[in-house]
Amino acid sequence: MVFIESFSNARFKWLKGLAKSRNRRKEGLFLMEGRVELELALRLGHTPRLIAFTSSYITQIEFRSFGFDPNEVEWIALSKALFDTLAYQQVPGNFIAVFPTFEPALEQEGGLMAVLEGVEKPGNLGAILRTCDALGIKQVIVTNSEIDLFNPNVIRNSRGAIFTVKCAFFSNEQAKDFLRSSKRLIVAAALTEDAVKYTSLDQTDAMALVMGAESKGLTDFWMLIADQKVVIPMLGAVDSLNLSVSFAILASHMLSRN
């Protein structure tokens, strides 16, 4: 096991670099913190390549209860100062795991799925994945977004749902082709005159809830091909909701009717 305490150490710089999307894509690896997330990943067959930790927060011996063979994982011990620059949480028991990235393959199955166009905030995507896991939604498509699935804020806000919900990144055209081939009703969340109150939605077993970025909403691409458009009435002084909250309201209602 290697112990690192220098900020100029090449291995430390490599670890720190995985916080950037281009390096994650190049290396095919991503960083993840949290015992709950690690235990879920292990239960679903994902094994870390590397564990970075500091003895100020956790010892190698404590990892024996996590359920994987410590001899199969590379270990890097960091000074507290180095670890704190990498970690989002400086708390007892924390560590950083390095996992291989993966590309979930979507399936032509029934039920509700989500389509998110141009989502801007990684935290929103993570929260929506977490909501999908809670509601039993198995598949999500993200289109025209600069975010990647392994952004640290996506991972942290998903609480491990990146491992339980299939999330694919498509172009709008690819997403449309997939939805049409699976014969899904395309339901767009929209602030338009022809949008109906979400509780009035005509529903079928196979639907796709399509939502856009908070700042822009959906583009004309989805407005033109949507089978139905829905809106959440705003009864107070505030004229909008957070994207992940809006998704939870709409998805919960759509599932309750099936």
Image (spheres, rainbow, N blue to C red):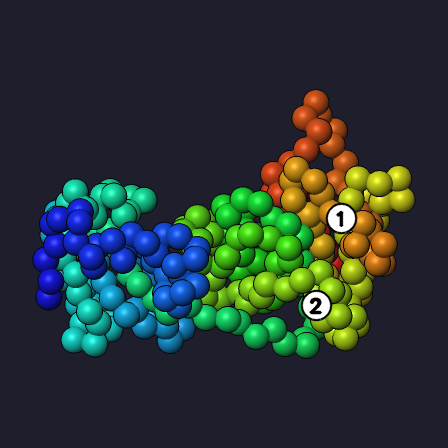
Within-10-Å neighbours for mark 1: few <14, some 14–19, many 20+: some
- Secondary structure beneath dot 2 equals helix
Q: Can residue 133 be seen in this view?
A: yes
| Nearer-the-camera pick, 249 or 240 | 240
For badge 2, the amino acid type reads: Gln
Q: Name the residue under label 1.
A: 219
Choose top left, top right, bottom left or bottom right for residue 142.
Answer: bottom right
Quadrant that contains the N terminus: bottom left
Where 114 sits versus 109, above or below? Answer: above
For badge 1, the amino acid type reads: Thr
- Residue in the picture at 55% in, 67% down: 166
Confirm or deny contact between disc 2 and disc 1 (CB under 8 A): no
Position of 161 with respect to 42 (left or right) is: right
The spot of residue 114 in percent (x, y) is: 66, 59
Marks 2 and 1 sit apart, C-alpha to C-alpha, by 15 Å
- Residue in the picture at 66% in, 37% down: 215
- Secondary structure beneath dot 1 equals loop
Q: Is residue 255 visible?
A: no
Which disc is residue 147 wearing?
none
The spot of residue 9 in percent (x, y) is: 16, 54
Q: Mark 2 points at which residue?
A: 174
Mark 2 or 1, nearer chain start? 2
Position of 89 with respect to 40 (left or right) is: left
Where 173 sits versus 55, above or below? Answer: below
